[in-house]
Amino acid sequence: MSSIEEIRTAIIADPANQAYTEQGIQPLFQAGSGAKIVIIGQAPGLKAQEKARLFADPSGDNLRAWLGVDTETFYDANQLAILPMDFYYPGKGKSGDLPPRKGFAQRWHSQLLANLPQLELTLLIGQYAQEYYLKDRRKRTLTETVQAYEEYLPQYLPLVHPSPRNNIWQAKNPWFRTNLVPKLQEKVSQILDK
């Protein structure tokens, strides 16, 4: 089994990532062998890539509030791992960022997850993560999948993206804040306080 740093080196050297490597762009993920929770997101946004830090934006503020953790805990790789479905900003599309590149998670996630033996919970943020990890266990819509979160525990917990653009969705789905978020915070606290 390759170490996390060996995998990082292989990602940088991968010809599929050559355009990023030539620009000096590093793969964005966070993983430590002691991590107890992993966050599977979509792909870094342009600001995250420029800052070289995942969720260093209002989405991250929302996500940390949902989890009930401070910034220090969130960026402690031995507490929380963060593995987007692609470790590089995929570019701009017609209506927002392009989706993560196909095949990227398939190539790298299992290798990295093999280095995280303490994992107790996988948070699946958004449709790409849920599609890949839940496969045919997903419901008809993302909302239905997130609403049925208890069906996927204790291994997985699906979430919507914490982007402020989803505030309208949250307003239409008050159960998310009143039911899911408190249970998420309780679960995160139980895991991290061990």
Image (cartoon, rainbow, N blue to C red):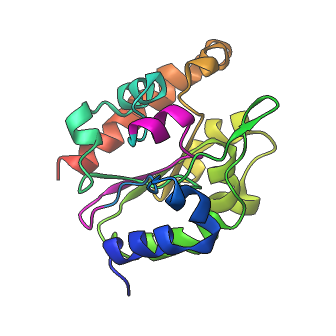
Report the residue at 67% width, 51% height from top: 100
> Viewed as shown, does residue 96 lie left or right of 118?
right
- The quadrant holding residue 118 is bottom left
Expressed as whole percent of the image width and height from the top left, the position of residue 125 reads 56, 43
Residue furthest front as drawn: 22
State which quarter of the image contains the N terminus: bottom left
Q: Check if residue 153 falls in the magenta segment.
A: no
Which residue is at the front of the view, 7 or 153?
7
Residue furthest bottom as drawn: 1
Q: Is residue 59 above or below residue 127?
A: above
Which range is magenta? 32-51
Q: Check if residue 50 falls in the magenta segment.
A: yes
Expressed as whole percent of the image width and height from the top left, the position of residue 39 reads 45, 49
Report the residue at 82% width, 31% height from top: 94
Report the residue at 55% width, 56% height from top: 20
Q: Is residue 140 above or below residue 10?
A: above
> Viewed as shown, does residue 94 lie left or right of 142?
right
Q: Is residue 79 above or below residue 68?
A: below
> Viewed as shown, does residue 181 lie left or right of 76?
right
Expressed as whole percent of the image width and height from the top left, the position of residue 2 reads 37, 83
Report the residue at 47% width, 55% height from top: 83
Which residue is at the front of the view, 84 or 68?
84
Q: Is residue 162 above or below residue 33?
A: above
> Viewed as shown, does residue 72 lie left or right of 55?
left
